[in-house]
Image (cartoon, rainbow, N blue to C red):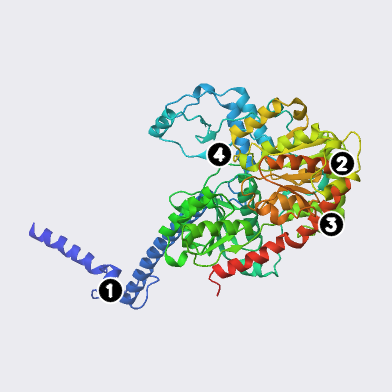
Amino acid sequence: MDEHNRIDVQRNSGRQSSRPVLKSVLSGKSTPRGRGSPSFRRLNSSPNPRRDGRVNGFSTNCFRSNRIVLWLLLITLWAYAGFCIQSRWAHGDNKDGIFGGNDEIEKSFDLSVSKINISNVLTDDVKINVNQSDVKEMDMSKEMNGTHDVSHNILSVKKRKKRSRRGSSSRAKRGNKKKVLETENSKEVEVQEEEIPQTNATYGMLVGPFGSIEDRVVEWSPVKRSGTCDRKSQFARLVWSRKFVLIFHELSMTGAPLSMMELASELLSCGGTVSVVALSRKGGLLPELSRKKIKVLEDKDKLSFKAAMKADLVIAGSAVCASWIEQYLDHSVAGTRQLVWWIMENRREYFDRSKLVLNRVKQLVFLSESQSKQWMAWCEEENIKFKSAPSLVPLSVNDELAFVAGISCSLNTPAFTTEKMLEKRLLLRKSVREEMGIKDSDMLVMALSSINPGKGHSLLLESVNLATNKKPGGMIADGQNFKKMLRGSEEKQGNNIKLLIGSVGSKSNKVIYVKSLLGFLSNHSDLQNSVMWTPATTRVASLYSAADVYVINSQGIGETFGRVTIEAMAFGIPVLGTDAGGTEEIVEHNVSGLLHPTGHPGTTVLSKHLQYLLKNPSERRRLGLEGRDKVKKMYLKKHMYRIFWQVLYNTMKVK
């Protein structure tokens, strides 16, 4: 047995000696050889096993670490791309149409409303019923928005976040009349109830807007109507590559928001970066801002303050912005207070609202001499001292209106010369008047403004009523000069006065006042046949082309400036205005128009002026041409931005 075991041990030891002992390459030690054992070498190995182990180990670790870095890089890029897309979507930056345009949103909204199941339309705890008339009104609103008009836009629709249960119950207790519809994609829209039905049954005769006629006759679509900046001007060189934030107090189609929109468009055209903050989104300017590619910020979580602090200049366009300005100045550091406050109101209530912040802004800007004197007098009463003297920047006629009026501007091309546009304007006048049912012998009197007591519409109706009911023999204006002019008047039979009142549906209208005007007309059936109404719209070139006389009947201390005054003058229309405020500065009596007193004493004088111009078409032409020449000399875009450049230069940190 012992001998047998010795034989097995010898065999095993022989096997072990005949094989090389292999150890891990990473150990760095060579394999020992037994005596007489064959030489052994691994394929693809280096002569030095220790060095070979170090090289292979390094390459493996390097490969693994590079793979981790690659994955980290891909994750970072993916997160950054997602952040950029989400940011552009949240802030409405959709220039490339990545997220779908406004048309797609409107179509999807209309489709969701048409398919909505009334029984399933619920808010948090309130069930809402929608009738077919509401859907029809929404469809009509959508069609009008297709031409960027707000004529029959009875329902204002906008997106908002889903409300909480507590907020809904509290608003229900307050008697809120707004309706909320939940669409298929779980988004909610707010539908505001109409206050006064915009129908002929309510207003007697509702006409316009005439955007489609204007596009057909002028052959120049709104998409192409973006003014080109004068790159050689000082204003363009100053604005180029700078950031601006413009503060709108609202988005209604009234003087201040429209003026600020034109400023934003010009800054953008000249190479600046423009962001708009709307303190209130009521009104119909949002589609127009979208058409002009002007970015509107959502004022949430103090986003407007952050954007303003990063901007080179902040421009606030109303005295109503006082509260925002005060909060912004409290949040901003001293180096970011580059703020211009362009005040466009001229009533004491607006001064009282803003007096605590007036001396904190870097630069105040007014529209007219009368406004500046009035505000300075109020400041002296309150002992308010300014950091710098206020500036004066009058408004101007934008290029879109100047283009249709036949005045040379940036939109003119060899195919659309001023002479060609004058011919098109006559064709536009004829088409619009035919649509209104106005004869060539009729005198169309127009008043486009928000409908409130300060604009004097009730006094205007009384004046038109007097002018249409009195006989020509009794319409002799006071003063010897007027009597001489009336003796040679060109009397014609069958002439009638037609009055067109604008801005129906504007969010700045006073509903009670509008109802009082409708009540006055219902008591004067003859006058009712002579009065027409037109919705609020930015497409006013067709209206100016059709008009013969423009009335600016602002009461109290008068109009702050009167942008509609210079727009009417640009179209060669004589202006009948009150002898107060900015109107008195723009209109020279018996040169570019006729002035009358404010209040009831001016009612009789205005009626005489209307009757006089009705009987003297040649006087209408003379006054209109004088006003047009004044606009060419003083109130075009180039005149305004030549003055505005100095304001920006003094306010901004120009290196």
Q: Is residue 221 above or below residue 331?
A: above
Separation of marks 3 and 2 at Cα, in angstroms: 30 Å
Identify the secondary structure beneath mark 3. helix
The extreme left residue here reads 2
Separation of marks 1 and 2 at Cα, in angstroms: 117 Å
Looking at the image, residue 393 sits to the left or right of residue 121; the answer is right
Identify the secondary structure beneath mark 1. loop
Sequence order check, earlier mark of 1 and 4: 1
Q: Nearer the viewer, mark 4 or mark 2?
A: 2
**To which residue does mark 3 refer?**
418
**To which residue does mark 4 refer?**
158
Amino acid type of the residue that numbered disc 4 sits on in the rendered structure: Lys
Separation of marks 3 and 4 at Cα, in angstroms: 40 Å
Out of 521 and 408, give the one closest to the viewer.
Answer: 521
Residue 539 visible in image: no
Disc assigned to residue 615 = 2
**To which residue does mark 1 refer?**
28
Amino acid type of the residue that numbered disc 1 sits on in the rendered structure: Gly
Sequence order check, earlier mark of 4 and 2: 4
Q: Nearer the viewer, mark 3 or mark 4?
A: 3
Identify the secondary structure beneath mark 2. helix
Q: Is residue 590 above or below residue 129?
A: below
